[in-house]
Image (tube, rainbow, N blue to C red):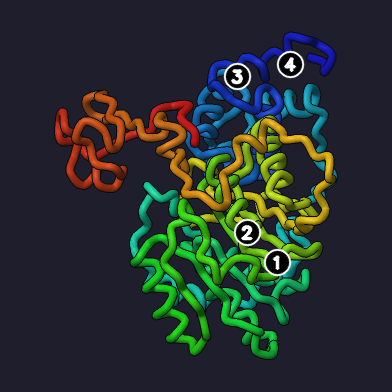
Amino acid sequence: MTPSDPANKDVLARVATATNLREGAEGVATFLRAVKREGPAALNQIARTARLPVPVASALRRELETEGLLTRRGGVGLSEAGGRFVAEVLGLGDALAPHCATCGGTGLAGPDAGLVDRLSSLMAKAPKVDVTLDQAPCTAATALRRALLMLETGALEGRRILVLGDDDSVSLALCLVAEAAELPALPAPITVLEVDADWAAYLEAAAGEIGAELRVIRHDLREPLPADLRQAFDVIETDPPYTLEGARLFLARAAQALVPETGTLGFLSFGAQAPAWQARLLAAVAEAGFAVTGLYPGFNRYQGAGLLGSTGQMLTLAGTGAADRPADHRQTEAETDAPDADARYAGPLYTFDVNPRARRYRCASCGAVHSLGEDGVPATIEALKAGGCPACGATLFKRQAGDRG
């Protein structure tokens, strides 16, 4: 078997087709590289390394087992044939491991264990997530890592900071990091816009518990920003719904909130997707008036979010300033799709709005397929499990293969 043999590389294309993988053959190769690096290991660990949703990783594992390239001895691992394949076809060796196990590729030291414990104790009191709002809280370590990145890049000291949506408790992490760094008082309290009443109440209570000053405002970002929040901030942080529509809307509101000057800063957490999708995300970032100054793959770890592989990227942004747009600028296709910052947004926003397939679950007992929120079926998988399959009463369900947000 040699790398130049087309039949060998056809395996990648065949598996990509069988699993409807958006990333194509290269995505299969990435999955195999992750197995080579991590395996034998649990599937969710392989999915995180490959930055693939767990259901997609599961489908890839099955197909690659059928091809004889993977085994399940002690976790997902390469078979003898799989070892030869990654060496001869993908050209992978054993000598070097360039990934930094300590910093996770971020270049940042990990958060202090004491800070992680403090934030974890606060987050333990958070309300139950609402998956219909794409809520998927990150880990305490991730929230603190975001705050440390903001500190490292000069986005914390002396800054007016706005957090757009905060089921990740980043505002609390910022307060803890500012205290630990013994920073002077910020020019204004960190402001949070949060649509969920329970989460808003939790953030306020948690801030009071640690003696931090936090301004939490109930606001649905489908609505334009209140007048007193426009052009009032130097820094924004957001982890919007994982749809392009969500990214466009949150970035439009963020741009509206920042002072119209070059040098304002943004921190955008978002799930990694196929290259074509990523290109559309970066186009939306540029259209909102931001330049990408840094991209950290796998920066974020989430407590759930199996569709995202429980991981996501971090993009650091710089505002270009309203005056930077050329006078002869022509409106682009992406721009015509961008939300109007001064009008209510009435289009699709969350994953369930944009991709109805993400609602579909098959009963493991009777095989009936149910769409969440339709035909009397509960709107969340948790509620469906609690009530049981409408057809047979069983409580075990599997997401339909290939359904991705």
* The image quarter in which residue 162 lies: bottom right
Label 4, residues with CA under 10 Å away: few <14, some 14-19, many ≥20: some
N-terminal of the pair, mark 1 or mark 4, is: 4
Would you name the residue on which mark 1 appears?
Answer: 259
Q: Nearer the viewer, residue 43 or 127?
A: 127
The Cα atoms of the two marked residues, 1 and 2, are separated by 8 Å
Image coordinates of residue 343 in percent, x first then y, are 51, 49
* The image quarter in which residue 73 lies: top right
Amino acid beneath label 2: Gln
The Cα atoms of the two marked residues, 1 and 4, are separated by 52 Å
Amino acid beneath label 4: Lys
Image coordinates of residue 190 in percent, x first then y, are 57, 76
Residue 15, label in figure: 3
Mark 1 vs mark 4: in front: 1
Mark 4 vs mark 2: in front: 2
Residue at image location 51% in from the left, 69% down from the top: 192
N-terminal of the pair, mark 4 or mark 2, is: 4
Mark 2 vs mark 3: in front: 2
Residue 75 visible from this viewpoint: no
Amino acid beneath label 3: Val
